[in-house]
Amino acid sequence: MTQALNILMLGGGNMAQAILAGLKRSGLAATIQLVEPAEALHKTLTQTGGLASDALFTSLEDLLRRTPLTEFNWLVLAVKPQQAQEALLPILGRTTQSGSMGMGVGMGNAASSPALLSIAAGLSVQKLHDWSGLQAIVRCMPNTPAMVGQGITGLYAPTGLQTLHRQQSNDLMRGLGPTVWLDTEDEINTVTAISGSGPAYVFYFVECFIKAAQATGLSPDTARMLAWQTVKGSVALLDSSEETAESLRAKVTSKGGTTAAAMEKLGAAGLEQTLACAIDAAQKRARELS
């Protein structure tokens, strides 16, 4: 993409910082101005986020007094869901909603309004439109490995969204890791349950693995090293292999051996069913929050 994007970002927390790092990683040409009320984060945003101090603001009103909303191509909503309506309030009075419902949310209206990219979980396209007045809206669900460029992001937009907006929103997120476009808005809830919440499942497994290793009598440092390197190495092997996880597991599991004894216990404990129930619970909760 040759056109440099002018981006207004609301929120400067961990995911916003991940997006900034991803933009640098991908080399996307972009000028960014960011609103973050917590001044304690401004130093981090300038030092690690690469933002100039005059591109940081504590309030959206101050920013819009210097740069009109019409100059931005994208508004990136990177605040917590409960803060979103208040964060978008100054935008609402500066956008045109006339005829919007007739066109269909997501199609985009006048070129004077930016498109909205939201990472706020549980906020529907319709709700984001109602709170902002913006038409071209993309919802996305990244996960925390995005902070090291190893995330995956699910993206959803109504069918009427312009191809250019789809391309640009994809470019905004590709520096965080692979992207996946979803067919329906409800699939965002599934993505939330699998990859959005998924890192916590992995961290919890590693946590339990370390505790189990310590319970055998190993020192905490040795238990941590053995458990973590086993997980890390196994993921690397799976990533580099053309074989499935099932196939690789079978190769480690000799009949009547130590691994088979352990796998029998994991199966009896219902690990597969427990994980399925956990994902189902997360998906239902995501729908409730929506």
Image: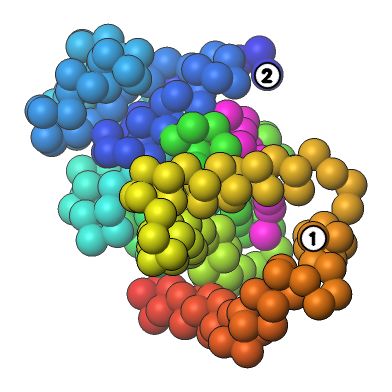
Label disc, if present, on residue 252 of the rendered structure: 1
Q: Secondary structure at mark 1?
A: helix
Picture layout, residue 242 above or below residue 193: above
Q: Which residues are magenta?
A: 169-182
Q: Nearer the viewer, mark 2 or mark 1?
A: 1
Picture layout, residue 31 above or below residue 222: above
**Residue 70 image position (x, y, % from top left):** 38, 28
Q: In terms of depth relative to the viewer, which is nearer, 33 or 164? A: 33
Q: CA distance from mark 2 to mark 1?
A: 46 Å
Quadrant in which the C terminus is drawn:
bottom left
Q: Image point 44% across, 35% down: which residue?
A: 147
Visible residue check, residue 238: yes
Q: The disc labelled 2 sits on which kind of residue?
A: Met
Instruction: Estimate how packed mark 2 is, as few (under 14), some (14 to 19) or many (20 or more) residues with alpha carbons within 10 Å.
Output: few
Q: Image point 68% across, 19% down: which residue?
A: 1
- Pointer 2 residue: 1
Q: Image point 51% across, 27% down: which residue?
A: 22
Q: The disc labelled 1 sits on which kind of residue?
A: Val
Residue extending farthest to the front is: 217
* Left or right placement of residue 91 versus residue 224 in this view: left
Q: In terms of depth relative to the viewer, which is nearer, 99 or 264? A: 264
Instruction: Estimate how packed mark 1 is, as few (under 14), some (14 to 19) or many (20 or more) residues with alpha carbons within 10 Å.
Output: few
Q: Secondary structure at mark 2?
A: loop
**Residue 168 image position (x, y, % from top left):** 61, 32
- Residue 94 part of the magenta segment: no
* Left or right placement of residue 90 versus residue 151 in this view: left
Label disc, if present, on residue 38 of the rendered structure: none
- Residue 180 part of the magenta segment: yes
